[in-house]
Amino acid sequence: MKIAVICANGKAGRLIVKEAVSRGIDVTAVVREENRTEAKMMLKKNLFDLTAADLEGFDAVIDAFGVWTEDALSQHSTSLKHLCDILSGTDIRLLIVGGAGSLYVNPEHTLCVSDGPDFPEMFKPLAQAMAKSLDQLRKRGDVRWTYISPACDFQADGERTGKYISAGEELILNSKGESVISYSDYAIAMIDEAVSGGSIQKRISVTAE
């Protein structure tokens, strides 16, 4: 299996690469500068400059792109649109490192985590930008996409337990009543989905056990 990880030098990207390499998967790190991952192969290119030819031959492309400053938040939509456009009509899977703010908290799917009174005001613009990109992604019937939302407490330096709970569009809590997952365990879920998952054109979510 051949996987490309875009924005592989980021915190999530590096751990996703590490997990894939540990399983013997053929991994290419797509980075703007030097390769700081465990991948032996790299493609030095900006996401927005990628072409269909660059991604030809991969079984899956994992999008670990992320920006947080308010002036750049629109890039969550524009970057995803670009990747969808160059993968349009192919069999290559596109898996996206998503956000938790857009997870639903009611069966009617009318309220999201970010609508809650305790959701931090400072994170609302990011949550809204990522929700918008997801809404646009749902309209792409020409791409084999999967959007994977982490738990609300997404811990960059959290412990790798090797276990996680997979769910759908609604927020779920673990046995401790928590919505939490480490980047390392999220990486396991991401590679599991890339290798054997069947969640085509769906948003799924993961949390720690």
Image: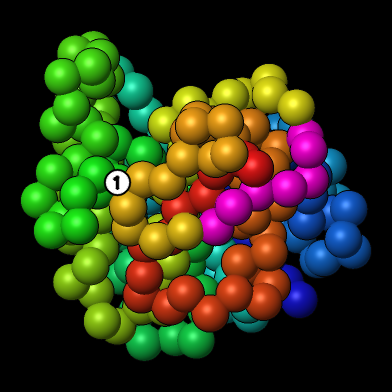
Q: Could you tell me if residue 10 is visible in this image?
A: no
Please give the count of numbered marks on the rendered protein: 1
Q: Which of 90 and 178 is in front in this view?
A: 178
Q: Is residue 127 left or right of residue 175?
A: left
Q: Where is residue 130, by image quadrant? A: top left
Q: What type of secondary structure mainly makes up the magenta span? A: loop
What is the x, y in percent for residue 166? Answer: 54, 57
Q: In which quarter of the image is the C terminus?
A: top right
Query: Circle 1 sits in a helix, a strand or a loop, which is it?
Result: loop
Q: In this view, does 47 lie above or below 27?
A: above
What is the x, y in percent for residue 177? Answer: 49, 32
Q: In this view, does 153 lie above or below 64?
A: above
Residue at position x 68%, y 20% from top?
A: 157
Q: Which amino acid does label 1 sit on?
A: Leu
Residue 164 magenta-drawn? yes
What is the x, y in percent for residue 30? Answer: 61, 49
Give the magenta range.
Answer: 160-166
Residue 189 magenta-drawn? no
Disc 1 designates what residue? Answer: 103
